[in-house]
Amino acid sequence: MVFFGFQNIFQKLAALTFGLVAVSSSASAQSQWTVTMTAKQAAAYEEQKSQKGTKAFAISPDGAWGYTYGKNSAKDAQAQALAYCREHMRKKQRDCMVYSLNGKRVAPAVVQTKKVTTIYKPLKAKDAAKVFGFAPGTFTGNKAAAKAEYNALKKGAVTKATLPRDAALEALLTNRSLMTKGNSPFLLWFQKSGGEQHGKGRGGALLSHFDSWRATPNGLMCMFDSYWDSGKAMGTRCLYIDSLKNGEARVAWIHISGGQQKAQLLQGDARYAAVR
């Protein structure tokens, strides 16, 4: 579970059960700061202390905070607490830092503060490349052949186990974020053993998971055993990757008629807020 806030903002998010790689934060150093919490940060910290499971609390000298609990590891808890703290920062404010882990203070008495120059917030495509950078590599798909593979999969002529596999394309996608650039963007995060899809709907953030995935030499990328964050099953979903060239991409849902979407393949994990 995670909480985050800035000044009069205090919003509760649903429990999250996925990992997060560490996000980079490089900015010009500023003056030293004697680490102390504001009244609002202290109130949030007291509430977080009562929660169970692995947890972390992060704060900024300029008032932002974020915390997580019920995480699988200390690394996940700290990284996500930082991310949620950063989500409520503004440019030129001083960056967040981890204040405590599992209710025990880990922050030193005095730290050197840093002002951030760029803030990425989830699904803000224009800022993503500035923070994460484009992933190198190229790929060209074959839409007609990918469509035929998808139809064969639907009919049961091929299965998840027998679908052709492109190891090079899968390596290009693994531990990276594929994000579309349209008015209703979505993001796919790929791991060796599965991944997630993040998007936005009328009701707010949308999150789904998939337990496994496979990419073919023709550009068909299928996510198997998908399910919403609520646990409701979604089945198999397939995306067509038409092209990748040093971070610039064009993709389309294979089952939907219509044009392709511009996308970008990012070096790191863009599921959460990050800064430079």
Image (cartoon, helix red, strand yellow):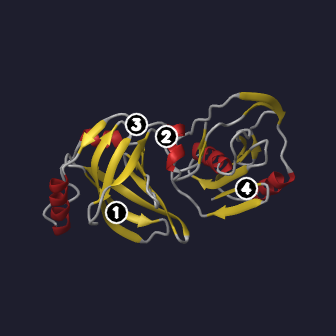
Which numbered marker is on residue 129? 2
- Ranked by sequence position, the earlier of labels 3 and 2 is 2
- Label 4: how many residues lie within 10 Å, few (<14), some (14-19) or many (20+)? many
The residue under label 3 is: 135
Q: Along the horizontal axis of the image, is 262 left or right of 169? A: right
The residue under label 4 is: 5
At mark 3, the secondary structure is loop
Q: Nearer the viewer, mark 4 or mark 2?
A: 2
Can you say whether 259 is above or below 242 in the image?
below
Residue 58 percent across, percent down from the top left: 71, 46
Residue 78 percent across, percent down from the top left: 63, 44
Q: What is the distance, in whole Å, between disc 4 and disc 1 at their CAs?
A: 34 Å
Q: Residue at x 37, y 42 (%)?
A: 248
Q: Are marks 3 and 4 in contact (CB under 8 Å)?
A: no
Q: Quadrant of residue 92?
A: top right
Q: Amino acid at mark 4?
A: Gly
Q: Along the horizontal axis of the image, is 120 left or right of 62? A: left
Q: Amino acid at mark 3?
A: Ala
At mark 1, the secondary structure is strand
Taking the image as drawn, is residue 162 in sight? no
Q: Amino acid at mark 1?
A: Asp
In the foreground, 176 or 62: 62
Q: What is the distance, in whole Å, between disc 3 and disc 2 at their CAs?
A: 9 Å
Residue 81 percent across, percent down from the top left: 65, 48
Q: Nearer the viewer, mark 3 or mark 2?
A: 2
Q: What is the distance, in whole Å, between disc 3 and disc 4 at their CAs?
A: 32 Å
The residue under label 1 is: 225
